[in-house]
Amino acid sequence: MTGTFAMAGGDLAPAPAPTMENSWFDAITVNYGQSKDHIDIYRIGLRRDFRSRWFESSVGYLSGYWEGSLNYWNGRGDENFGIALSPVFAYYFHLSETAKPYLEGGIGASLWSRTAMGPRDLSTHFLFEDRIGAGVRFEHWDLAIRYMHYSNAGIKKPNDGIDIFLASVSYRF
């Protein structure tokens, strides 16, 4: 037998297997989208659900997740690579036993390899990552559509920003 052992009543016994509640993430997500000026957006991320619920009622509850992502933008002969971390708040509706629809919104931070993308001058490597979206969560799957906006919030001019519509599929462990 391999693994870690712990004392249980004086005897050596296998330690309990780690649970997803103790892990750094509990879902992996893949996204594809496009900006209005035809820049393709690819994202892969790791998520961890909040462990709390607020304002729970017969209608639903407020909770959310943390998402860390690796991002790749490609368009108009340009490429840009980025990393992002965002807290996302979601309101989950109690409409079905098998499917849980939700609305979400969040503001996070991202760092990018370039400060320009196609015709857009973003001016800084640091950009805020704003999002609103809607989705449906099943037992292991989560399907969503999102509108995301990246900009430096006027830290430096010009601040062209970029608007993106994304489709997202997540697998929850």
Image (tube, rainbow, N blue to C red):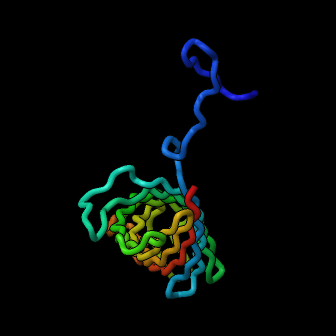
Q: Quadrant of residue 17?
A: top right
Q: Residue furthest top?
A: 10
Q: Quadrant of residue 122?
A: bottom left
Position above or below: 58 against 35: above
Q: Residue at x 64, y 17 (%)?
A: 12
Q: Is residue 157 visible?
A: no
Q: Quadrant of the N terminus?
A: top right
- Judging depth in this view, the residue of 165 and 118 nearest the camera is 165
- Judging depth in this view, the residue of 62 and 39 nearest the camera is 62
- Judging depth in this view, the residue of 70 and 6 nearest the camera is 6
Question: Picture coordinates of residue 76 (x, y %)?
Answer: 62, 83
Tag count in the figure? 0
Q: Residue furthest right?
A: 1
Q: Is residue 35 visible?
A: yes
Q: Residue at x 50, y 41 (%)?
A: 22
Question: Picture coordinates of residue 18 (x, y %)?
Answer: 57, 38
Q: Quadrant of the C terminus?
A: bottom right
Position above or below: 93 against 19: below
Q: Residue at x 40, y 71 (%)?
A: 131
Q: Quadrant of residue 104?
A: bottom left
- Judging depth in this view, the residue of 126 and 68 nearest the camera is 68
Q: Residue at x 41, y 76 (%)?
A: 134
